[in-house]
Image (spheres, rainbow, N blue to C red):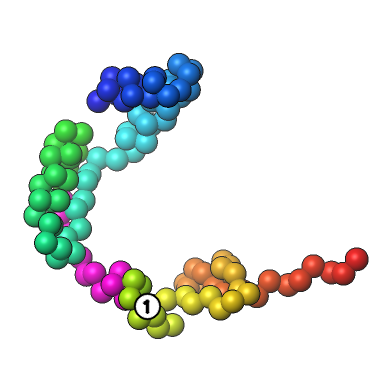
Amino acid sequence: MFDAMRQDLAARFDEEDVDFLIESQREQLAMHDTATYIDLGTETALAEAEYASKCATFMDWKFEQRTGDPTLLKDLLWGNWDSDRFLILEPGQQLGQATDESVMRAETPTPPPAT
């Protein structure tokens, strides 16, 4: 796998950069041992799960398949936003970090002091 990656990267980057990119990829892959496919009920789910399973086998990883619920994604894409499931930012607001279980909050930035 890394030989093919090295060959591909060598055509676009200096050798030192290629070494860095390959080592970075090795480090990232070493942190994982499982591929999970989440079936959202699409027409191509079976083929996609089979592909994910083959990739897991290639990587010598475990494979697991889970059934997911596409409702949140569908509502996001179709604009069915409610404040219980979505944080809606109004014009002029920005995303801020919350200190409670909500994790994020809408904030109105304070204008800088006049000079």
The image quadrant where one finds the C terminus is: bottom right
- Comparing 9 with 58, the one in front is 9
Q: Point out the stretch of residues depicted in magenta.
A: 64-75
Residue 5 x %, y %: 31, 25
* Residue 99 shows in this picture: no
- Nearer to me, 112 or 32: 112
Q: Quadrant of residue 30?
A: top left
Locate residue 28: give its quadrant. Answer: top left
* Magenta segment includes 69: yes
Residue density around tag 1, few if under 14, some if 14–19, many if 20 or more, within 10 Å: few
Measured from the top left, where is residue 96 in percent x and y?
Answer: 58, 67
Question: Where is residue 17 drawn, in percent x and y?
Answer: 48, 22
Identity of the residue drawn at 13% across and 51% down: 49
Q: Nearer the viewer, residue 108 or 97?
A: 108
Looking at the rendered structure, the kind of residue marked 1 is Gly
State yes or no: residue 68 in magenta. yes
Q: Quadrant of the N terminus?
A: top left
Residue at numbered disc 1: 79
Q: Is residue 21 above or below residue 95?
A: above
Query: Is residue 110 or residue 62 the one in the foreground?
Result: 110
- Whether residue 4 sits left or right of residue 67 in the image: it is right
In the displayed structure image, the side of residue 113 where residue 73 appears, left or right: left
Q: Is residue 31 in view?
A: yes
- Left or right of 32 in this view: 14: right
